[in-house]
């Protein structure tokens, strides 16, 4: 739950009083133009940034001034897929997915490898275990990033532009993968994107941001009925 | 001019905050033992050939340059002592530190800079892994640990090559060369200068990690970080040497 969140970088105001509640098991798509603070919102949710003011409650806990150890306990319950997947480039695909398991579980090496292979198989990457991130395509990196985000069985998933830079077919595949994992695990998800077509595949609810504020919030049909000029124009241009 | 001054103080301010987080990462458990061992290998073992060559070259140059000068003053018999003392007191430590600044400083600056701009450091933090512990502390501790050992290797190679170079001009046994060179050497001639390289290691690790982890601006930023890491590491090592030599003279 986010209450009256404000964030600026120097003189640039990015978030100007955001209020947002995401229900457990819900998939929320955060839409908006590039540079409207959508990614910053995700970074605030996971504690990579601190807000100038306001409250951020994640999985029932206020995180704004939480100490490092307790914040990390919450982070272990969150999976994050970065826009560029952010795979560790000196580790293989399998090692990338096994990394959080090695850090935060008592699994043996064999158990970690088995679990990593299961996760990679679920995203269609079981044949590329020994490859480095530089040796696979952008779409494949996103799949591996998704597998890594799911490694610790998170209660919440955050996606930063999961389909950005991908061709329409691959974008649809990633969207379907996200939907499949959400249905299977019933995880709360927040997806930041500017691609409505992909968002419609997996989102239950949509918010549209502009100039640091939320202009519309609801199911997609509710957004289409909005009388706000920006909302109408955004949906028209995205169609 | 004012902007440059502000930027100068901002850099030191940010470095101070970085040091605070790094100190917490180094001294407070848990520790990253496995990653530390990997860094000891990457920084120590893989720098050894380069440092050994640099030490060897320094030994040869010292032999060639000082032989003629000492002959002029009728002190040719002092040549082994001059080579050995020069190496262990100053040349060995500073050459080792500058070679490692170049190789390791640039490597760390580029590696961490690349991780920063591709969000790998953010991904690590979001995975509840402290990047200061995993990336920075391990590299700093590895630099502090390996610099004195690399200096010993450089000194050894310098002394051996110094002997070979001397012997080519006028045959001298290795035993005589080393005995003569170390005859008047004391604890304060050897250990403090070797251990000051631990301070050099701290400077190299700290500055390189700091520059890497604050990289901005894509691949151009990574290049800038690598370059600035080498330049600043070398500069601070030389300045620190002035201070440390003075302290060694006072306390030892």
Image: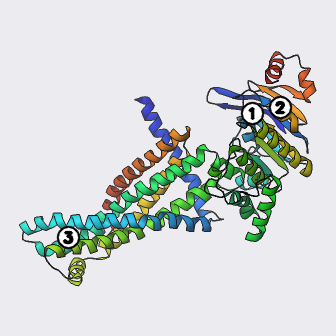
* Foreground residue among A22 and A173: A173
Q: Chain of mark 3?
A: B
Q: How is the image coloured?
A: rainbow
Identity of the residue drawn at 32% across and 56% down: B242
The disc placed on residue B43 is none
B197 sits to left or right of A139: left
Mark 2 lies on residue: A197
Q: In the image, which is nearer the foreground, mark 1 or mark 3? A: 1
First-in-chain label (1 vs 2): 1
The disc placed on residue A38 is 1
Q: Chain of mark 1?
A: A
Q: Is residue A197 above or below residue A48?
A: above
Q: For numbered disc 3, what is the local secondary structure?
A: helix
Q: Position of residue A53 (x, y in %)?
A: 73, 34
Residue A175 visible somewhere in the drawing: yes
Q: Mark 3: few, some, or many residues within 10 Å (few <14, many ≥20)?
A: some
Give a yes or no on whether discs 1 and 3 share a subunit.
no
């Amino acid at each position: 739950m986010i209450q009256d969140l404000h964030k600026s970088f120097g003189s640039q105001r990015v978030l100007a009083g955001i209020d947002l509640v995401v229900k457990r098991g819900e998939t929320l798509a955060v839409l908006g133009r590039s540079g409207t603070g959508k990614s910053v919102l995700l970074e605030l949710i996971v504690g990579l940034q601190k807000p100038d003011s306001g409250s951020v409650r994640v999985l029932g806990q206020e995180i704004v001034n939480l100490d490092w150890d307790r914040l990390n306990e919450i982070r272990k319950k969150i999976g994050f897929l970065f826009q560029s997947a952010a795979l560790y480039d000196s580790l293989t695909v399998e090692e990338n997915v096994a990394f959080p398991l090695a850090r935060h579980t008592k699994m043996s090496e064999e158990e970690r490898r088995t679990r990593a292979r299961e996760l990679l198989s679920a995203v269609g990457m079981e044949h590329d275990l020994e490859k480095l991130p530089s040796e696979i395509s952008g779409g494949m990196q996103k799949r591996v990033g998704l597998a890594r985000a799911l490694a610790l069985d998170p209660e919440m998933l955050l996606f930063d532009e999961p389909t950005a830079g991908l061709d329409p077919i691959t974008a649809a595949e990633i969207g379907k993968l996200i939907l499949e994992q959400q249905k299977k695990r019933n995880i709360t998800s927040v997806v930041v994107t500017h691609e409505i077509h992909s968002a419609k595949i997996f989102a239950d609810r949509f918010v549209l941001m502009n100039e640091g504020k939320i202009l519309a919030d609801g199911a997609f049909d509710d957004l289409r009925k909005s009388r706000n000029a920006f909302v109408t124009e955004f949906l028209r241009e995205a169609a | 001019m004012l902007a440059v001054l502000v930027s100068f103080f901002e850099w030191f301010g940010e470095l101070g905050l970085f040091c605070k987080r790094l100190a917490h990462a180094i001294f407070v458990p848990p520790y990253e033992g496995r990653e530390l061992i990997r860094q000891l290998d990457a920084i120590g073992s893989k720098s050894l050939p380069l440092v050994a060559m640099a030490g060897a070259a320094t030994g040869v140059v010292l032999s060639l340059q000082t032989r003629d000068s000492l002959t002029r003053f009728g002190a040719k018999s002092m040549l082994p002592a001059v080579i050995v003392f020069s190496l262990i007191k100053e040349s060995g430590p500073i050459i080792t530190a500058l070679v490692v600044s170049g190789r390791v400083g640039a490597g760390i600056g580029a590696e961490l800079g690349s991780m920063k701009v591709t969000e790998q450091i953010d991904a690590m933090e979001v995975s509840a892994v402290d990047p200061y512990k995993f990336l920075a502390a391990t590299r700093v501790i590895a630099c502090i640990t390996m610099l004195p050992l690399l200096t010993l290797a450089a000194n050894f190679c310098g002394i051996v090559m110094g002997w070979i170079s001397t012997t080519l001009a006028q045959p001298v046994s290795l035993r005589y060369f080393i005995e003569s060179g170390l005859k008047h050497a004391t604890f304060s001639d050897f250990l403090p200068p070797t251990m000051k390289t631990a301070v050099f290691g701290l400077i190299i690790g700290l500055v390189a990690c700091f520059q890497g982890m604050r990289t901005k601006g894509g691949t151009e930023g990574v290049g800038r970080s690598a370059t600035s890491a080498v330049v600043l590491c070398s500069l601070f090592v030389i300045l620190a040497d002035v201070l440390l030599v003075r302290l060694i003279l006072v306390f030892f």
